[in-house]
Image (cartoon, rainbow, N blue to C red):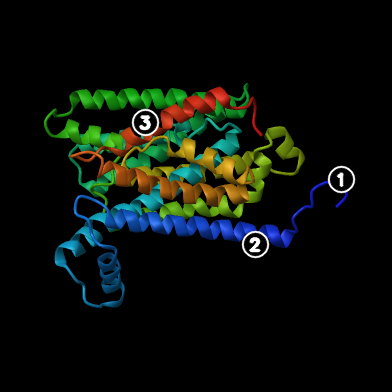
Amino acid sequence: MTRGSAAPIAAPGARRISAVFRACLAVAGLGLLVLIALVAGRFPVPVADVFAILAAKLFGTAPGDATAQVVVLQVRLPRVAAALVVGAALSSAGATYQGLFRNPLVSPDILGVSAGAGLGAVLGIYLALPVLAIQAMAFAGGLGAVAIVYAIGALVRRHDPVLTLVLAGVAVGAVLGSAISLLKVLADPYNQLPAITYWLLGSLSSVTLGDVFAILPAVGLGLLPLVLLRWRMNLMSLGEEEARALGVETRWLRPLLVAAATLVTAAAVSATGVIGWIGLIVPHLARGLVGPDFRRLLPASALLGAGYLVAVDLAARTIAPIEVPLGILTALAGAPFFLWLLAAGKRGWS
């Protein structure tokens, strides 16, 4: 190659192999993190025992130590499974919202879904309903909040539709937050109030495999259109006018993608409580690693979000004598990142 000539461009086949290698490396890293989460804790379980217990569950072999079996299968495995599903769901929803609103500072909370789910769950706890009913009310509350925001956006047509949705989401979220505060004041301070506070901070301590299987259909149904329409998401991130000029019918595509991301978020929050910041910081980290192309950004966000929540949950149950709610740890990590992002971020969307 002569002096001053351009550097050779990698062939498409080489780029594809490199992408597959990075994906395999990411999956292997996530698998290692899951193994660590099953091994580590106040009752350490040797790696060999973990594999023996999982093999006994899958293939019916000898189960090994009874205490270790209870710890792995009934305590840690449900938490890890929930962390994988919820982390991937919230991160995927965050990546979708950020692309639709063309802003890396947007999170799934922007349209009030977390506030709506919180109000539904708090109302269920206040009425002393069963756990399943509380989760159902949280799920319905999240979907209902976004439906109200979209109804307001449909009535207010004089302004930019994206700006209208954001402002309506802020207003509806404030109203729902005040309703949550009112129920906290009225709740029994000895029984209901601690449960309400703990739920609003998010936790995986009481999650079962049944809860994980219960939210999987809603999460899968919400992720399906995001996967199928991933190339159109790239056009939506260009802006309303540009997307329409390229033939995208934004009038139905934007509500569909918002509904899908909302369904995923509401399902995740209904099972674990409100876990903030994941949908904000993880998609931005994924965008820094793989770029803004939604075809790569969506799986990267899902993998990073799953691993991030597994790591946070591991820290929550090991760093203190009592379990720390997940919302506290995610806020401690997310708030400084948010301030850095706000100070160092570029003007506009790119």
> Which label was assigned to residue 117?
none
The residue at 24%/36% (across/down) is: 198
Q: CA distance from mark 1 to mark 2?
A: 29 Å
Q: Position of residue 313 (x, y in %)?
A: 32, 45
Helix, strand or loop for disc 3? helix
Question: Which residue is under mark 3?
Answer: 332
Looking at the rendered image, the disc whose residue lies closer to the viewer, 3 or 1, is 1
Residue lying furthest left in this view?
190
Q: Is residue 207 above or below residue 178?
A: below
Which amino acid type corresponds to the residue marked 1 in the rendered image?
Arg
User: Tags 2 and 3 in contact by the CB under 8 Å rule?
Assistant: no
Q: Is residue 187 above or below residue 134?
A: above
Q: CA distance from mark 3 to mark 1?
A: 51 Å
The residue at 58%/60% (across/down) is: 21
Q: Position of residue 33 (x, y in %)?
A: 38, 54
Q: Residues within 10 Å of mark 1 (few under 14, many from 20)?
A: few
Q: Is residue 151 visible?
A: yes
Which amino acid type corresponds to the residue marked 2 in the rendered image?
Ile
User: Tags 3 and 1 in contact by the CB under 8 Å rule?
Assistant: no
Question: Which residue is under mark 2?
Answer: 17
Looking at the rendered image, the disc whose residue lies closer to the viewer, 1 or 2, is 1
Q: Is residue 327 left or right of residue 71?
A: right
Q: Nearer the viewer, residue 80 or 169?
A: 80
Residue lying furthest right in this view?
2
Question: Which residue is under mark 1?
Answer: 3
Q: Is residue 89 left or right of residue 182?
A: right
Q: Nearer the viewer, residue 65 or 56?
A: 65
Which amino acid type corresponds to the residue marked 3 in the rendered image?
Leu
Helix, strand or loop for disc 2? helix
Question: Which image quadrant: the C terminus?
Answer: top right
**Dot 3 or dot 1, earlier in sequence:** 1
**Dot 1 or dot 2, earlier in sequence:** 1
